Amino acid sequence: MTDRIEVAATELRPLLEEFIMWARANAPGSDPELVGPAALWHRLAFSPDLGTWKRADLRNLLLDRMPKVVEDPDAAADGMLPAVDAYLTFLSQTGRLAEGSDSLADLQAELDDVEDEFVDLMEDLLDDDDGDDDGDGETGDLGDFEPFADELADLDTIRLRPDSELAAAARRVPLVAMARDLALWVGSGRRVGEETLLSDAEVEEALTAVGLPRPETDGSIAEAVPYLWNIWNLAVDLEFLQPGEASTVAVQDDTSEWPFDDDEDVLDAWMLGLHSVDYGDPELDDDDLTMALAGLTRGLLVRLLLAGGSRELGELTQDLADAAADLDELGADAWEAAGDPLAPAVDWLVGYGMVEVQGKMLSLTPLGTEGVVHLVDDADIELDARPAIESMSAHELLALSAELPEEEADAEFAAWMRLREPGRAAEELLEAAAEDESDALIRVQAASVVGTLGEDAVPAWQEALKQPSLRPYAATHLSQLGVEGAPEPTPDDTHWLILDMWTISAGLGRSEFVSSLRDIGPEMVNDLLEVIWKIPHAHVEELLDLISQVHPDKQIAKTARRALFKARSTT
């Protein structure tokens, strides 16, 4: 059976690789990785012809076979059917849905018919797994960040470098340039093969295009150049390559423009290829040994981050060797078989601009630190990473400070203010506060900080009078400073300030909001409700609705409902 699986997997691989490229452009919401097991077992159990699909076979595949072989029932419940739908659509649109198959519409109808039952089967598997859990749950691979979650959360604040500096580094990344050169060599419509994407002759041309040597091999060159295929996959990740019609791939129009002029475009592109770090994992002849070292490159990165960015290479090697042996019974054998498992990982990370080697030390670059922080964030693990003070915009400062304890927020503001003249700081903060009229918290924070700058902030306050959302704050502070000719705050200005404070209070939760209303007193709340509905505030309707629902005084709740009706009638 193992031989049959290997043969079937080899037959499927080129088709699945082309499907993955097709799905990026045509079915971005699907997970192509979920198609592999379904397509493999369809080939093994139901049809030797990869393009022949029948409704009955599809039903049996999903309801009988897949529950026996699926590895992640949770992911399958969410994504298997959309992925198979995308795969069948791909076969149909590329002419691979063979004669004798049921129509795409019929196959999609079958997917709809089996959906509820399939999801129920996956949920049953999840329930079984929960019932069998004795506390020794299955561990992840070497690249699993979860075991380090507490250590990552305890790290001191990580300061990320300015975008301009990171973009300059990304423009120099060798692997991105190689991916560009490979895509340009592919051209506007190169046909790919079914068994291997490129012929041996084409592989030799591609190697020359990206500057890689021809391997010494007695067999097929295509099977001896894993690094070239990693660069091919990187070109797909970077969206330099995209699938075309009739088994072709083509270069994207703007690929030749790399490195791009705009810093944001450069960093967006580099981030698209960030998950290529997995290509640095060792590839061995034995699949089981290869899997025993899966995630090695990520494991290297997280250990560097935890060490403050640098570690001695020999020490890091021993640490990862021990981790591999502890994690998998084949870990030690795999490590020995790989010879120097860290070599491909370090080589790929150097090529992607994420690490540098200096003597016996391996260190994260600023670009590498940025990348690891993103990977940790993708894993939903907490980490205190902030922009460098000197590169932090006023809006970034305000948004960050809103999430910090007061003492830390004050320290961030103080450090940021030291880099600017007070008048310029006031201008930047108020401009940031005006960006989104619905963001009351940012507005209140900005006004509070600018209010400490005294007369230096007068020009900024005068400019802020032109912004409806900031006028109440500007009029209040200019009046307090005794600025000649400044407008006096109006009742509407006062009502706007109250609505801002209610908005912030509501965001803290129901109990906080009710408490803030009680602090005002029922009589004043009632008086406010009679007039406050007229204020063109972004949150006035939802605040009136909330008061009508949560205020313990039924008469005030009734007044709030009446005010809400008036507010809605005027919009």
Image (cartoon, rainbow, N blue to C red):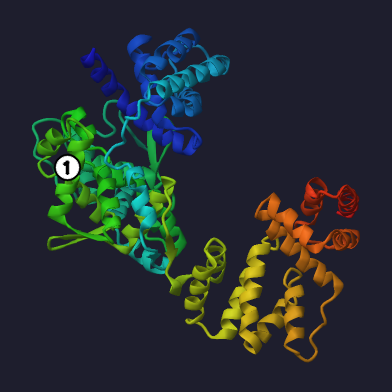
Q: Which residue is mark 1?
A: 322
Q: Is residue 214 left or right of residue 45?
A: left
Q: Is residue 83 left or right of residue 362?
A: right
| Quadrant in the picture for the N terminus | top left
Does residue 62 lie above or below 454 as drawn?
above
Q: Mark 1 belongs to which amino acid? A: Asp
Spot the residue most to the bottom: 484
Image point 85% across, 75% down: which residue?
490
Q: Nearer the viewer, residue 243 or 175?
A: 175
Q: Is residue 500 left or right of residue 315?
A: right
Image point 62% across, 69% down: which residue?
445
Does residue 225 lie above or below 135 as drawn?
below
Q: Is residue 255 visible?
A: no
Characterize the local packing of mark 1: few (<14), some (14-19) or many (20 or more) Cα atoms within 10 angstroms.
some
Q: Position of residue 515 (x, y in %)?
A: 73, 56
Q: Position of residue 438 (x, y in %)?
A: 70, 60
Does residue 447 lie above or below 276 as drawn?
below
Q: In what element is the residue under mark 1? A: helix
Q: Position of residue 80 (x, y in %)?
A: 46, 25
| Quadrant in the picture for the C terminus | bottom right
Q: Is residue 369 visible?
A: yes
